[in-house]
Image (cartoon, grey):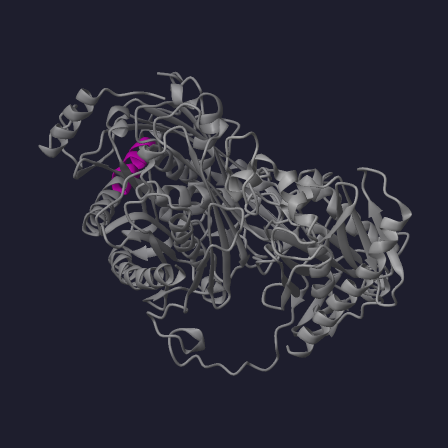
C-alpha cells in the first residue's frame, strides 16, 4: 500500500506506514470491514485450552487466545475460617503480569493493569455465585479449604481479562481435591493421596471484550495494538443461562445505546462457544 | 570498585605462572592466621580470626524458636525461608547466618554493592551449614519435637579486608561453634501430652554443640591466567577470572562447591582444583584444631587474663 | 498483608499426607525409582519463539518439568548507563502453583540466588563486549517443578535456546545437567522424590564445543572422587543435551 502526497510520488511500504500513522492504517482496513490480521470486525481469535497439564497444581489450564497465552494454576491449602462465617472457604484469585510477557511490565509488585484485573475477578467471585463456598468446608469452625487461583500471563497480546477469566473457570471446573479428615486432637487435617473430589460450579460466567475505534467501529477481542489505538473498551460477562453477570466500560468516550446493544448478541454467542469448547475438551480428557 | 592497572595484572599473572607470588608464597601456600575465641561475653560463643590483614569477628547466639512447619505466607521472613521443596522437618533445629561487611573495611562494602556481597556470603553460609553436610547435628537442637527448637544465629562482622574473605569466615565460624555452649534443657510432661521445658541457669552445665568437629571449612581457589592459587590477597583477587569455592570437612569430604565470577574452566583443571582443595582443607582443619587446643591450654594457665581487644 | 494483591487468610497450611497403609507397588529393585537407569535423562522437548513480544523465548518440557523463558535485549536500562560491556540481568521465579508447597509471589532468597547463578553461568558465554551500555534481560518462570536442581539445569538449557532465538551473539551454547548421589551411585537428572531422599545435589553447566565448564554448584556431602566422577558424568550428559538443542534449533527455522 502506498501513500501518495504531493506531486512527487512519496511511496511508503506497509510496515513503515503502520508505524508512522497507525490510526490511518487501521482506518484503511476498517472501511473495508476487515482488520489487519485478517479478522472480521466481530470475529474472536482462535482459542485453545489444555487442561490439567500441571501435576503439582490441583487444577490447571493453559489457554491460548491468538498470541495471548496465560497459565492458570490452583493450589488448595487449609486454613481456619473467619469467625463470622465458620463454614465458608476462601477463593483467592490473582493475575500476574510479569516482565516475561511484555516489555511494558516492570519487575516488582503488580502494576495498575494487573491489580485492576485481579480486583474485577475477585468482585465477580464475591458477587456472582460461582462456587458455593460452603462446599469448601472441612470441619466447621476448624478448617476450610483455601483455593489460591493464580493466573500467570506468558505472552501478552491484548484482552487479558477474557483470557484470565476463561482460564480460571476452566481450571476450577477441573479442580480435583483430595479427601480430607480433620483430626480433633492434633488440630490438623489429613489428606488422602488420591485427588478425587471435584467442585461443582454453580454457574460459569464468561466474558467477551470489545473496543471502540473511531467512535463507530466495534472490534471484538482486541490485540495489543488495537487496545492502544481504541478510545474505549467494553466487557460483557454472561453466564450459561444467557443472563448478564457483569458489564464494564472503563472510562473512554461516551457510547450510544445502539452501539452497546449491538454487541450483546455477539457476546452471548461467544460465551456459548467458549463453554462448548470447554465441555468438549473436558470430554476428551 | 577497586581497580588494577593492566601492567600490575600482567606482573601478578606472570609471577603466578612461575610459582612466585608477590609475597613470596607458592601457589598453594596459605598465610598464617591468629585466632582468639570467647572474646564477646554476651554471645554464646565467639571468635576473632585474622588471616594476615583480613579480619573477621563472629558472634554466635543460641535462642529458642518455633520449628517451622509447612505454612505458606507471602510475608515470609526471607532469611528463614528455606528451599522450596524441603520436607517438613519437625525434629530439627536450624542455623541462621548473616554476614555484614563493615563499610570501613573496604570501598567495595559501601552502598548497594554491599547488600549483594552480604546476601551472597550469607546464602553460601546458610547453604553449607544447614543440613547433614554442615556437620552440626540439627536433631540435637530440637527441644520439643514439632514445637520448639534451638536456633543458632551466626553473625559475622567483617572488620578488615585483604582477600580471601570466605575462607576466613568459615575458619572463624568453625572456631566460634567450637566455643559455643548451649544451656541444658529439662523437659517435663505436664499431662495432656503437652510438654514444657526449663532452661538450666548454671553456666557449667552448658554443653558443646554436637557435631562441631564436622563443620567444614572452605578453600577458595582463584584461577589467574592458566594456573590457580589458594588464599588470594585483594590484589590477586582483582586479577582472577574464575573462582571456585569448595567446602571440605575434616574427613576430606566435599560439602559444597560453587563457582563464581565471569570466567570458565577446563574440566581437567576443575578436577585438579578439587583434589588440591581436599588436601589443603584437611591440613587447614588440623592447624585450626591444634591452634584452638593451644589456646585452651594457654587460657587455663594464664587464668583468663585478657589484654586488649583490638591488638 | 500485600496491599497490591488479593489476600487470603493470614496463615494456611498444606494438609498432611496420609501415610498409605499398604506399601505401594515398589519397583525398587534397581537403584532408582521408576526403573530409571543411573544415567537416564528425562526426554527433553524445547520449542523456541513462544512469546510474541520477547526478542527471544523458549519453552522447555521434560516429563514433569515445564519452564518458559523470555529474553529481552539488548536494551538500555538505568542499570547499564555507564559500562563498556553489556550486563546480564536474570530473574528466576517459580510460579506459585509449580511446587508441592505453594510459593509466594515475592522472590525468596533461593530464587534470588538461582538468578545470580544463572547470570554467572552465562557470563563466559555471551559476547558482552559487543553490547556496551545495554542490558540483556532474561526472565525465567518455572511452571511445574519436579526437582529443584534439575529445574535449574533445565532453565539454563532453555535460556541458551532463547538467547539464540533473540539473535544474541554467544561463543557457544550452554548446556546444563544435574545429578545426585543415590546409594553411592551418581544418578543424572533427579526428580523431586529422589531429591528429597538424598542430600547431595550437583549441577554443572558446560559449553560443549569449547569444552569449558561455565558453572558448577554442589551441595551436600560427597567424596572428592565422587564429585570428580559426577563432573565427568554431567559433561557427557551435557554433550547429549547439546544434540537435542541443535536438533531443536535446526528444525525450528
C69 displayed left or right of C84? right
Number of numbered discs overlaid on the protein picture: 0
Asked if residue A184 shows in the view, the reply is: no
Q: Position of residue C57 (x, y in %)?
A: 47, 51
For this rendering, which residue is in front, A53 or B229?
A: A53
- Magenta span: helix, strand or loop, mainly? helix
The quadrant where residue B150 appears: top right
The quadrant where residue A102 appears: top right
Above or below, comparing residue B287 to residue C152 in the picture: above
Q: Position of residue A241 (x, y in %)?
A: 88, 67
Q: Position of residue A98 (x, y in %)?
A: 59, 45
C236 displayed left or right of B214? left
Q: Is residue B151 magenta?
A: no
For this rendering, which residue is in front, C24 or C121?
A: C121
Asked if residue B111 shows in the view, the reply is: yes
Which residue in the rendered view is the most extreme toward the front? A7
Q: Position of residue B27 (x, y in %)?
A: 16, 35
Above or below, comparing residue B311 to residue A100 in the picture: above
Q: Which residues are magenta?
A: B285-295
A241 displayed left or right of C98? right
The quarter of the rendered structure image containing the C terminus of chain C is bottom left
The quarter of the rendered structure image containing the N terminus of chain C is top right
Residue at point 35%, 74% (across, down) = C37
Amino acid at each position: 500500500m502506498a501513500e501518495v502526497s504531493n506531486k512527487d510520488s512519496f511511496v511508503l511500504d506497509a510496515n513503515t506506514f503502520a508505524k508512522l500513522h497507525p490510526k490511518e492504517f487501521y482506518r484503511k482496513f476498517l472501511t473495508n470491514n476487515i482488520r489487519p490480521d485478517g479478522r472480521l470486525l466481530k470475529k474472536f481469535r482462535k482459542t485453545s485450552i489444555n487442561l490439567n497439564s500441571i501435576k503439582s497444581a490441583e487444577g490447571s489450564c493453559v489457554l491460548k487466545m491468538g498470541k495471548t497465552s496465560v497459565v492458570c494454576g490452583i493450589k488448595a491449602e487449609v486454613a481456619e475460617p473467619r469467625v463470622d462465617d465458620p463454614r465458608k472457604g476462601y477463593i483467592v484469585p490473582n493475575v500476574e503480569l510479569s516482565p516475561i510477557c511484555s516489555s511494558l511490565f516492570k519487575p516488582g509488585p503488580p502494576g495498575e493493569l494487573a491489580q485492576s484485573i485481579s480486583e474485577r475477578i475477585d468482585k465477580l467471585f464475591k458477587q456472582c455465585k460461582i462456587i458455593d463456598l460452603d462446599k469448601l468446608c472441612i470441619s466447621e469452625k476448624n478448617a476450610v479449604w483455601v483455593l489460591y487461583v493464580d493466573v500467570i500471563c506468558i505472552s501478552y497480546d491484548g484482552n487479558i481479562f477474557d483470557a484470565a477469566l476463561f482460564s480460571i473457570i476452566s481450571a476450577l471446573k477441573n479442580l480435583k481435591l483430595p479427601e480430607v479428615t480433620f483430626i480433633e486432637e492434633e488440630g490438623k487435617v489429613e489428606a488422602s493421596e488420591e485427588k478425587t473430589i471435584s467442585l461443582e460450579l454453580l454457574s460459569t460466567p464468561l466474558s467477551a471484550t470489545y473496543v471502540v475505534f473511531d467512535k463507530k467501529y466495534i472490534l471484538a477481542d482486541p490485540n495489543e495494538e488495537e487496545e492502544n489505538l481504541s478510545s474505549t473498551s467494553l466487557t460483557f460477562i454472561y453466564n450459561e443461562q444467557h443472563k448478564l453477570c457483569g458489564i464494564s466500560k472503563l472510562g473512554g468516550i461516551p457510547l450510544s445505546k445502539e452501539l452497546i446493544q449491538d454487541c450483546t448478541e455477539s457476546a452471548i454467542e461467544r460465551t456459548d462457544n467458549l463453554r462448548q469448547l470447554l465441555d468438549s475438551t473436558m470430554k476428551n480428557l | 570498585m577497586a581497580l588494577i592497572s593492566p601492567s600490575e595484572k600482567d606482573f601478578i599473572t606472570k609471577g603466578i605462572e612461575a610459582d612466585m607470588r608477590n609475597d613470596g608464597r607458592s601457589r598453594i601456600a596459605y598465610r598464617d592466621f591468629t585466632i582468639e575465641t570467647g572474646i564477646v561475653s554476651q554471645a554464646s560463643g565467639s571468635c576473632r580470626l585474622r588471616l594476615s590483614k583480613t579480619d573477621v569477628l563472629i558472634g554466635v547466639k543460641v535462642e529458642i524458636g518455633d520449628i517451622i512447619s509447612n505454612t505458606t505466607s507471602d510475608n515470609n521472613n526471607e532469611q528463614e525461608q528455606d528451599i522450596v521443596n524441603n520436607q517438613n522437618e519437625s525434629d530439627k533445629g536450624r542455623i541462621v547466618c548473616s554476614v555484614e561487611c563493615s563499610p570501613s573495611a573496604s570501598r567495595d562494602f559501601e552502598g548497594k554493592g554491599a547488600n549483594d556481597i552480604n546476601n551472597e556470603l550469607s546464602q553460601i553460609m546458610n547453604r553449607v551449614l544447614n543440613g547433614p553436610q554442615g556437620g552440626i547435628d540439627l536433631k540435637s537442637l530440637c527441644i520439643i519435637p514439632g514445637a520448639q527448637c534451638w536456633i543458632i544465629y551466626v553473625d559475622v562482622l567483617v572488620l578488615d579486608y585483604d582477600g580471601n574473605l570466605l575462607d576466613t569466615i568459615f575458619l572463624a565460624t568453625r572456631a566460634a561453634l567450637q566455643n559455643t555452649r548451649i544451656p541444658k534443657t529439662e523437659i517435663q510432661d505436664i499431662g495432656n501430652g503437652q510438654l514444657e521445658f526449663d532452661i538450666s541457669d548454671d553456666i557449667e552445665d552448658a554443653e558443646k554443640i554436637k557435631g562441631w568437629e564436622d563443620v567444614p571449612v572452605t578453600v577458595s581457589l582463584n584461577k589467574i591466567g592458566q594456573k590457580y592459587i589458594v588464599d588470594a590477597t585483594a590484589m590477586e583477587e582483582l586479577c582472577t577470572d574464575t573462582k571456585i569455592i569448595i567446602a571440605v570437612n575434616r574427613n576430606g569430604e566435599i560439602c559444597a562447591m560453587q563457582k563464581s565470577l565471569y570466567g570458565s574452566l577446563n574440566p581437567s583443571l576443575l578436577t585438579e582444583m578439587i583434589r588440591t582443595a581436599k588436601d589443603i582443607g584437611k591440613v587447614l582443619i588440623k592447624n585450626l584444631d591444634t591452634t584452638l587446643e593451644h589456646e585452651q591450654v594457654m587460657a587455663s594457665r594464664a587464668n583468663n587474663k585478657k589484654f586488649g581487644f583490638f591488638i | 498483608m500485600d496491599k497490591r494483591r488479593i489476600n487470603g487468610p493470614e496463615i494456611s497450611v498444606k494438609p498432611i499426607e496420609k501415610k498409605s497403609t499398604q506399601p505401594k507397588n515398589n519397583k525398587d529393585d534397581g537403584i532408582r525409582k521408576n526403573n530409571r537407569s543411573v544415567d537416564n535423562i528425562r526426554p527433553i522437548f524445547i520449542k523456541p519463539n513462544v512469546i510474541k513480544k520477547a526478542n527471544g523465548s523458549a519453552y522447555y518440557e521434560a516429563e514433569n518439568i515445564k519452564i518458559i523463558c523470555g529474553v529481552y535485549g539488548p536494551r538500555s536500562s538505568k542499570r547499564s548507563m555507564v559500562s563498556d560491556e553489556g550486563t546480564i540481568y536474570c530473574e528466576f521465579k517459580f510460579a506459585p502453583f509449580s511446587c508441592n508447597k505453594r510459593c509466594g509471589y515475592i522472590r525468596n532468597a533461593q530464587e534470588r540466588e538461582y538468578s545470580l547463578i544463572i547470570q554467572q553461568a552465562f557470563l563466559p558465554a555471551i559476547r558482552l563486549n559487543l553490547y556496551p551500555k545495554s542490558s540483556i534481560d532474561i526472565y525465567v518462570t518455572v511452571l511445574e517443578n519436579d526437582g529443584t536442581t534439575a529445574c535449574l539445569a533445565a532453565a539454563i538449557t532453555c535460556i541458551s535456546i532463547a538467547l539464540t532465538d533473540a539473535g544474541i551473539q554467544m561463543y557457544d551454547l550452554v548446556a546444563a545437567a544435574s545429578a545426585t548421589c543415590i546409594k553411592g551411585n551418581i544418578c543424572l537428572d533427579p526428580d523431586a522424590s529422589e531429591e528429597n531422599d538424598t542430600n547431595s545435589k550437583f549441577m554443572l553447566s558446560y559449553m560443549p564445543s569449547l569444552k569449558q565448564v561455565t558453572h558448577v554448584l554442589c551441595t551436600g556431602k560427597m567424596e572428592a572422587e565422587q564429585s570428580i566422577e559426577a563432573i565427568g558424568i554431567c559433561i557427557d550428559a551435557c554433550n547429549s543435551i547439546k544434540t537435542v538443542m541443535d536438533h531443536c534449533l535446526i528444525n525450528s527455522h
